[in-house]
């Protein structure tokens, strides 16, 4: 009896992976459910352990009919050969996603057999301040978009004493929190979800390391409600980790006591911002807090709080296991380590690419992504989510890094790249950016709340040919006010896609005279 591997990732399930797994089981095969390898255009990707090579061989786009009619053979047109030798995977540098697609996400023995817990064990053998300095030395920066050095944030929390919950009686026990923001709302991004569904123990291990480093006793993973599979997987992983002694009292026989719970968001994009997330967890409306104080000093319920994105926190176990110096040797300049890039939009081979910083957008879109799905020329690529800049095709040789993208007029964000071919109307995309801001604004500050509505109206006027030059001046002035006056990145960064579209594709803003506004929005 052969051992077959079928993804349980929600992207694979959406195209029939569950039915394929059931068909294999009914045929008498041993089936292991894994995460996705990240080659989403091949899902369901089915693999089998090959005794002759000691490696897994695979078949892409498998259906139940293929299982039933015997198409899963090496002569089949579906056959891909040795999976790890597929050029898309072979060209990657997988640190964070090293186990995703390989292990059963909820099998603790499988996790340990593939290197799990090595980072936590290494950290527990160190003093807490040594762990913090290892993270500092690695150069790890926030993967959620801000790019702030993770180790500096941890050091700040470590240096501040635990506090009782705000409003609690003075005798109430003091706490520190580790909060992971999994409110992954950017268009074209899905790495957080894939990590939680494909390697949840890695995230929990990173949180436990952080707890030891800063002296925290409580952890929360804040997951967007639109991720039901990730929520379920994380709940199950937490229960298993407690049974294994990886969470709870005296973790792995140490003095560390730390536990984790899940909180589910209510659909607000703004809760991707750290202070709005804290408000939501505390049971309040998800609006941005004014800073200072920063969350590292007074965060969740007024306690010192580490807040990291999923990819940031899940990077920590491999750093502690393999060494900060090895991690820091990857990348370029102050952009150190690897980044999980997500390829989406009009692209032939969408999915996950983990590479060291410095790879170019051209390499990602053309060599890994295979160009556009339509086969037409690339017109623009939006990097960094719906608030990121649109880079034209002739500017895609920029190195993917925090500083290099800023110099090119963009930002890295969460590492998403959304591709558009030459049929896209960039004025329509700019209009969408303003509409998106108007829809998702928490409403706390005027530049974001009102500016986005006025911005959409001005773009409508320009596209209809109404005083285009005058309205362009007005639009640029409005964008300046939003950038300088908004309380958070929601309003502050919305002008980035608008101005990049206007600067790089000015003709698109003057090519639709006479079209009524209602048709603009259809």
Image (spheres, grey):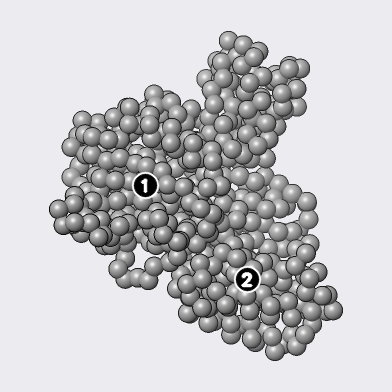
Where is mark 1, residue-wise? 220
Q: Is residue 161 left or right of residue 65?
A: left
Q: Residues within 10 Å of mark 1 (few under 14, many from 20)?
A: some
| Real-space Cα separation, disc 2 to disc 1, in angstroms | 32 Å
State the image coordinates of residue 431 (x, y, percent, origin top left): 68, 70
Q: Is residue 267 visible?
A: yes
Are the two marked residues, 2 and 1, in contact with CB atoms closer than 8 angstroms?
A: no
Q: Which secondary structure, mark 1?
A: strand
Front-lying residue, 349 or 66: 66
Q: Which secondary structure, mark 2?
A: helix
State the image coordinates of residue 327 (x, y, percent, origin top left): 37, 47
State the image coordinates of residue 235 (x, y, percent, origin top left): 43, 36
Tell me: residue 56, above or below residue 95: above
Where is mark 2, residue-wise? 434
Residue at horizontal 53%, vertical 29%? 34
Q: Residues within 10 Å of mark 2 (few under 14, many from 20)?
A: many
Quadrant of the image containing the N terminus: top right
Front-lying residue, 404 or 252: 252
Tag 1 or tag 2, which sits nearer the N-term? 1
Residue at horizontal 72%, vertical 68%? 428
Mark carried by residue 6? none
Residue at horizontal 68%, vertical 63%? 380
Tell me: residue 344, above or below residue 79: below
Q: Is residue 21 left or right of residue 249?
A: right
Quadrant of the image containing the C terminus: bottom right
Q: Is residue 364 visible?
A: no
């Amino acid at each position: 009896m052969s051992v077959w591997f079928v993804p349980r990732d929600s992207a694979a399930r959406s195209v029939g992976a569950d039915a394929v797994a059931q068909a294999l089981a009914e045929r008498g095969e041993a089936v292991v459910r894994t995460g996705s390898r990240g080659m989403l255009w091949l899902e369901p990707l089915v693999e089998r352990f090959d005794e002759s090579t000691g490696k897994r061989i695979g078949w892409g786009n498998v259906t139940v009919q293929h299982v039933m009619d015997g198409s899963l053979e090496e002569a089949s047109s579906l056959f891909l050969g040795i999976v790890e030798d597929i050029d898309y995977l072979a060209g990657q540098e997988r640190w964070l996603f090293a186990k995703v697609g390989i292990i059963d996400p909820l099998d603790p023995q499988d996790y340990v057999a593939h290197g799990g817990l090595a980072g936590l064990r290494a950290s527990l053998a160190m003093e807490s301040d040594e762990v913090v300095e290892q993270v500092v030395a690695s150069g790890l920066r926030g993967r959620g978009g801000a790019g702030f050095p993770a180790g500096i944030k941890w050091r700040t929390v470590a240096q501040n004493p635990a506090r009782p919950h705000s409003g609690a009686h003075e005798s109430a026990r003091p706490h520190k929190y580790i909060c992971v923001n999994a409110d992954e709302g950017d268009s074209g991004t899905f790495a957080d979800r894939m990590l939680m569904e494909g390697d949840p123990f890695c995230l929990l291990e990173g949180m436990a390391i952080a707890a030891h480093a800063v002296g925290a006793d409580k952890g929360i993973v804040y997951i967007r409600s639109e991720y039901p599979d990730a929520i379920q997987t994380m709940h199950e992983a937490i229960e298993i980790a407690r049974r294994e002694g990886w969470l709870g009292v005296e973790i792995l026989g140490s003095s560390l006591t730390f536990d984790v719970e899940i909180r589910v968001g209510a659909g607000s994009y703004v809760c991707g911002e750290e202070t709005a997330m804290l408000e939501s967890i505390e049971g309040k409306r998800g609006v941005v807090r004014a800073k200072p104080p920063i969350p590292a000093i007074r965060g969740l319920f007024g306690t010192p709080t580490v807040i990291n994105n999923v990819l940031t926190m899940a990077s920590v176990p491999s750093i502690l296991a393999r060494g900060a110096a090895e991690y820091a040797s990857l990348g370029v300049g102050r952009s150190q380590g690897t980044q999980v890039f997500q390829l989406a939009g009009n692209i032939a081979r969408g999915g996950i690419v983990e590479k060291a910083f410095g790879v170019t957008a051209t390499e990602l879109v053309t060599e890994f992504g295979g160009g556009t799905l339509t086969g037409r020329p690339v017109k623009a690529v939006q990097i960094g989510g719906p608030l990121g800049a649109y880079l034209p095709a002739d500017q895609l040789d920029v190195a993917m890094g925090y500083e290099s993208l800023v110099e090119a007029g963009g930002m890295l964000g969460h590492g998403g790249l959304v591709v558009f071919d030459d049929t896209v109307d960039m004025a329509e995309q700019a209009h969408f950016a303003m509409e998106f801001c108007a829809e998702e604004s928490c409403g706390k500050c005027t530049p974001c709340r009102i500016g986005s509505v006025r911005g959409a109206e001005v773009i409508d006027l320009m596209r209809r040919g109404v005083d285009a030059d005058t309205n362009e001046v007005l639009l640029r002035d409005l964008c300046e006010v939003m950038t300088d006056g908004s309380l958070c990145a929601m309003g502050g960064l919305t002008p980035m896609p608008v101005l990049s579209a206007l600067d790089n594709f000015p003709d698109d803003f003057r090519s639709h005279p006479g079209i009524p506004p209602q048709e603009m929005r259809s």
